[in-house]
Image: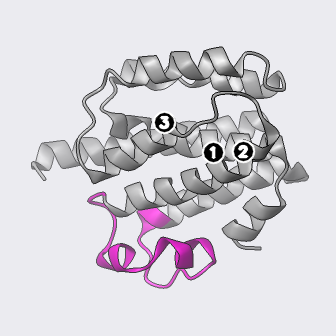
Amino acid sequence: MNLVESIARADERTLAASALGCLDRCVPLLGADPAHDEALRPLWTCLAEDGVGWDERITEARDALCDGVAVGEAAQWARRMLETAPDKWVSDAWREWADLCSVAALQAHRLLPGAGAGDRTAGVAALREGDTVRMSPLIAAELQRQTRTLHALGGGGGGLREALDVSTEGRRVLRAVMSRRARSGT
């Protein structure tokens, strides 16, 4: 089953975690200090508590992450994920947000130095549907993280803790890519 099909079949909590995971992995793109890596942690807790306090926690997360200096097209994709997060825990909003975050995270990763030329020319829709020919390790890893998150919460894995671990791992990788880019001056 490809990523598009997995999102289409996911339940509300899985969709929220999938979207939040994409956003969490892209926090470094927002120009946020590494100390802000925990800004989304209360939202993960909210998922564990069936959405209790989501509206307050998403506002706090936006306030915490909007003070970074986000520049470039990749940062715009990350900001879009944050801005489009549902303000309330409403069931019909999760599928749209999960789909948008999946696309935005892949778009952002395609723009980074570790992405290959094939990643920049291949359409994100094709990647999400399984066309992974000539895909760079950076894009392959992001696709795998999105799939692992959906699988973990869809009954086939360790649940929310595993989804959070996958996001933390992805955030570290992205921060390393950005650090390498800063050192090389590109």
- Which dot, 2 or 1, sits closer to the camera? 2
Where does the magenta region start and end? Answer: 112-139
Q: Position of residue 167 (x, y in %)?
A: 58, 41
Earlier sequence position, callout 2 versus callout 1: 1
Q: Position of residue 68 (x, y in %)?
A: 30, 25
Q: Are marks 2 and 1 in contact (CB under 8 Å)?
A: yes
Kindly state the secondary structure of the residue where label 3 is placed: helix
Spatial separation of the CA atoms under disc 1 and disc 3: 12 Å
- Which dot, 1 or 3, sits closer to the camera? 3
Residue 28 highlighted magenta (yes or no): no
Kindly state the secondary structure of the residue where label 2 is placed: helix
Earlier sequence position, callout 3 versus callout 2: 3
Residue 75's image quarter?
A: top left
The three-letter code of the residue at mark 1 reads Ala
Q: Name the residue rendered at 52%, 21% in the picture.
A: 61
The three-letter code of the residue at mark 2 reads Trp
Above or below, comparing residue 119 to residue 133 in the picture: above
Q: Is residue 112 left or right of residue 51?
A: left
Q: Name the residue rendered at 28%, 44% in the picture.
A: 178
Q: Residue furthest right?
A: 155
Residue 166's image quarter?
A: top right
The three-letter code of the residue at mark 3 reads Glu
Q: Position of residue 129 (x, y in %)?
A: 63, 77
Earlier sequence position, callout 1 versus callout 3: 1
Q: Nearer the viewer, residue 138 or 26?
A: 26
Residue under label 2: 94
Q: Position of residue 44 (x, y in %)?
A: 68, 27
Residue 83: mark in rendering:
3
Within 10 angstroms of label 2, few (less than 14), some, or many (20 or more) residues? many
Residue 52: mark in rendering:
none
Q: Are marks 3 and 2 in contact (CB under 8 Å)?
A: no
Within 10 angstroms of label 3, few (less than 14), some, or many (20 or more) residues? some
